[in-house]
Amino acid sequence: MVRAVADRTFVPARGVLEEAGDMVILTGKTIVSAIRPPYPYGGEFVSQFLFALKLCWFPLLITMFVISYAAPGLQAANFLTLFGAIDRMGGFFVLAVVREFAPVICSIIVAGVAGTAITADLGARKIREELDALQVLGVDPVKNLVVPRFLALMLITGLFDVFAIFAGVAGGVVANLVSGGATGPFFATFFTNASTTDLWGSVLKCTLFGAITAVICCYKGMTASGGAEGVGRAVNQAVVMTLMATASFNYVFTQTLLATHPEINIIR
Amino acid sequence: MTPSDDDRDRIEEEEREGDIDEMPRDAVDGDLDPEPQVEPELEEDERFEDELEEAPHVSVVSEPDRAAGGGDADEFQYHTEAHHAVEGVPDAIQFIDVHKAFGRNRVLRGLNLGIPEGKISMILGPSGTGKSVCIKHMVGLLYPDQGDILVHGESVPSMPDIELFEMRKKFGVLFQDGALFGSMNLYDNVAFPLRQHTDKGEEEIAEIVDRRLLEVGLADSGDKMPNELSGGMRKRAGFARALVLDPEIVLFDEPDSGLDPVRTALLCELIKEVHQENGGSYVVITHDIMSARRVAEFIAVLWRGRIVESGPASDLFNSSNPFVRQFLTGESSGPLGME
């Protein structure tokens, strides 16, 4: 009975740790393959970039605008109105949208839209033995499949972060106006509190979210098994793992950024 | 990253149906038997060896006696592992005491096998016994937990990646259902190895691809996408792609699966014709006995992770081993049941 309990506890935990280790190994192989010549993945990189761009821009725009309008927008406006400080909305939006909401929502949208497509594509190839056929034909699947997706998702999330910030701030402006505030004070406090550290920190964090998404989604696709059901399971697991990983990484990155740049902690 | 989870799934599915033996719980930490268990010699083998001594064209190389005892003795009682080597023909591929487990499922349990050079060899066995796992070991898609695999004398598991990629150029592989690349049409699929590994110009590539497509009866289908083809057409296209670099060794993973009897017969004839024309060592994985009768020159019967018997097809079809006889005749009574 002790053995049964131990098996139920430790065997799944060992499986999770093995998977995490495999993903770290895949990350290392991807980075090395990306740097080491030759570079046959140019066409695939462009194709994956445009694919993610085409699929994600509209959902990101709508989601970012609506969430910024509702959560930090209306809720914060109600709260700030109590203190007669509605003009502080702009400064609050630096913390809320630029530092947190934009990269996180961007990561969620890219994972849910492009990441799932990547997992499904690679998973389908895996169960059709296309990946085995590629290896037997002397094609390195990491260099030719994972690296272009890794680079494409990093680039697209970094660029989308700026787009998301614009959409989010627009939502905040609308919420501010609806709550009786004016745009002048909104932007005055916004630019007083915003710094280049906030901007590059947000873009860098979002770029790394893209890298995490690419590695997890490619890994789950390339290790899918169990036919079509297995591919569906892999897609589901990829999204869940990506969200958990990006949330965890968000904590570490934010903590590190605030500790290394204490000046951004000051609210002006 | 864990390779070939498809095989693990296939085996787990068989296990749920009760076809695969699970590892005993007390060996769950991967302590495989340090030495393979030995089955007692049968009287039939002694008679069998006497008969074989009268046939000068083959030599019997039996496995040496191993220590008897242990729980595996009963399940390997039919595994004589008699290997009827063909004189003067070296082995293209050798499996030396190969063990492979996927979690608790021990798929290969001390596999010893020699695939002769220049022949059409077949690995036969019940579903889920690890035939496809064997093929994947040959090309380095899987690595053994124990033992070695030699291809023309070179150890595959010990090769660095660069040598492994070079070694794979010796192989052409026909996967189940063809494994064509869905984003390319048939012509580009077949041309892919030539563009990847050679400096040939497009004209020369076109000549080779057209010839191979004509050989497999797909001359007019070059511009079709894989999802527009039937299962049989995909297999033939995969066959053309496997041959396009004139490989020394061609592997077929259940080429007849999903095909009707007529198309199976046609595919078998195609394999024989192409082998006659191009030579090389062909290894066919199947459990279809009719295909074995049509095509095989050398047969190895795989069961429970080990070779029961192997040798020229004529010897195996006349074998007195109860398991081999039951399997090759398709009889319902015998050592192999529904378990």
Image (cartoon, rainbow, N blue to C red):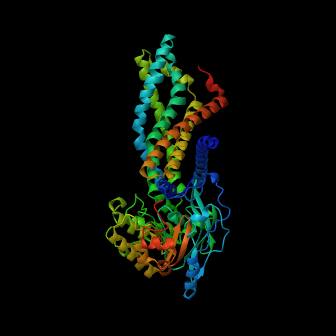
* Whole-percent x, y for residue A193 in the image: 56, 23
- The residue shown at (50%, 16%) is A87
Viewer-side residue, A266 vs B61: B61
- The residue shown at (61%, 26%) is A264
In the rendered image, the vertical position of residue B204 relative to residue B19, given as above or below: below
* Whole-percent x, y for residue B305 in the image: 56, 64
Q: Dividing the image into 4 quarters, which one contains the C terminus of chain A?
A: top right
Question: Which of the 4 quarters of the picture holds residue A176?
Answer: top left
Asked whether the viewer can see residue B198, the reply is no
- The residue shown at (34%, 70%) is B261
Viewer-side residue, A192 vs B163: B163
In the rendered image, the vertical position of residue A182 relative to residue B92, given as above or below: above
Count how many numbered circles sit on residues in the image: 0
Is residue A109 rendered to the left or right of residue B146? left
Q: Dividing the image into 4 quarters, which one contains the N terminus of chain A?
A: top right
Viewer-side residue, A144 vs B113: B113
Viewer-side residue, B226 vs A261: B226
* Whole-percent x, y for residue B12 in the image: 50, 54
| Residue found farthest to the front | B43
Asked whether the viewer can see residue A56, the reply is yes
